[in-house]
Image (cartoon, rainbow, N blue to C red):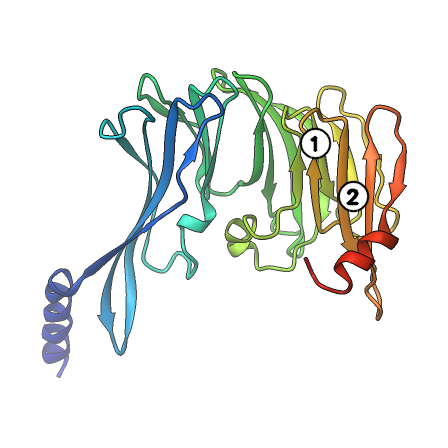
Amino acid sequence: MKAATLLLAVTVIMLLPACASGSSTFGRPVMDDNGQWLAFLTGEEVSVPWFMKHVRLREQVSFHWAPVDDLEQVRRIEVADRGIGESCTGLLGACHFRYAPDGRHVAIVTPQGIRIVDLAGGAARWLLADSSETVGSLQWMGDGELVYASYRWPEDANGHAVRTFWRQRIDAEERQVVHRDDQVRFGVWPRLLPYNFGNKPNEFWSSDGRSVLFRGSGRDGEAHLLQIETGELQRIGNGVPLRQASWNRRRSQVFWYGWERGGDRRPRAFSLNVVDGEIKDLSESFERVFGQSEV
């Protein structure tokens, strides 16, 4: 009986490659601000049929880029991969990228860290390669420096995360702590957190990376404003959990909104003039326009 079971197992393993099927998913092509490059991400998955369903054997994400005036000169590098059983959520959705202001470099966020690609030279390297540290968001602060927020889950933290805001030059291994936040709470299982950032971000960066509005730790989730160059932290949430935010291009004003806690869950909206510190309450008009819709 044992010999027959072993023979069956060996036969199944040998047949897996023959039964495997692949599929590809393409991300949205994005052009840099200078109009020189076009880049996009793709996800490829290999799976096999197994008892009326498909089991993922391997999944990988690749980064593609080409000059806008010669798209046939496309280049490709693999930026993330994983094997069977590592997660049930698509890997492509956990990856995103940002161009540097000069358009030459790209920073790619993956569940395995941050990858820097030199578009002109074709070289790629890991700026941060640590699967125990999840990068939630990043922004460029000039052409050669990144700012980003990362998360760790200490074993004794009861599911709470430690969030750290960092500054790091792309040609250096050392990085600088700007601010650290303990006891950060999330409504998703930690292993799935990278796949949740794209839908529900917790940090909202200004276009120059010098300021970030983020959800505070704890249950309140109020808006906090952090100045990266000085480390100055300001709580501006007015008791309302931060849902979404948007900066103007000049970094002089930021708009954010959320919903009050409790049964009514009324929408609240505010704008902050970063220059003079004035906060305007836009809740009345915001509620008339959007009502109770969870925008």
Q: Amino acid at mark 2?
A: Ala
Using the image, tell me which numbered label, if any, was put on residue 248.
Answer: 1
Query: Which residue does the image show at 64% across and 26% down from the upper left?
Result: 209
From the viewer's perspective, is residue 55 above or below residue 277?
below
Quadrant housing the N terminus = bottom left
Query: Which residue does the image show at 66% across and 40% down from the upper left?
Result: 203
Q: Amino acid at mark 1?
A: Asn
Query: Which residue does the image show at 50% across and 23% down from the upper left?
Result: 100
Looking at the rendered structure, the secondary structure element under dot 2 is strand
Q: Residues within 10 Å of mark 2 (few under 14, many from 20)?
A: many
Q: Residues within 10 Å of mark 1 (few under 14, many from 20)?
A: few
User: Residues under labels 1 and 2: Cα distance?
Assistant: 17 Å
Judging by the rendered image, the residue that carries numbered circle 2 is 223
Residue extending farthest to the bottom is 1
Give residue 53's position: percent from left, percent from top. 29, 74
Give residue 228's position: percent from left, percent from top. 71, 24
Asked whether residue 218 is in view, the answer is no
- Taking the image as shown, residue 126 lies to the left or right of residue 261, namely left
Give residue 164's position: percent from left, percent from top. 65, 35
Q: Which badge, 1 or 2, is on the more N-terminal residue?
A: 2
Give residue 101's position: percent from left, percent from top. 52, 20
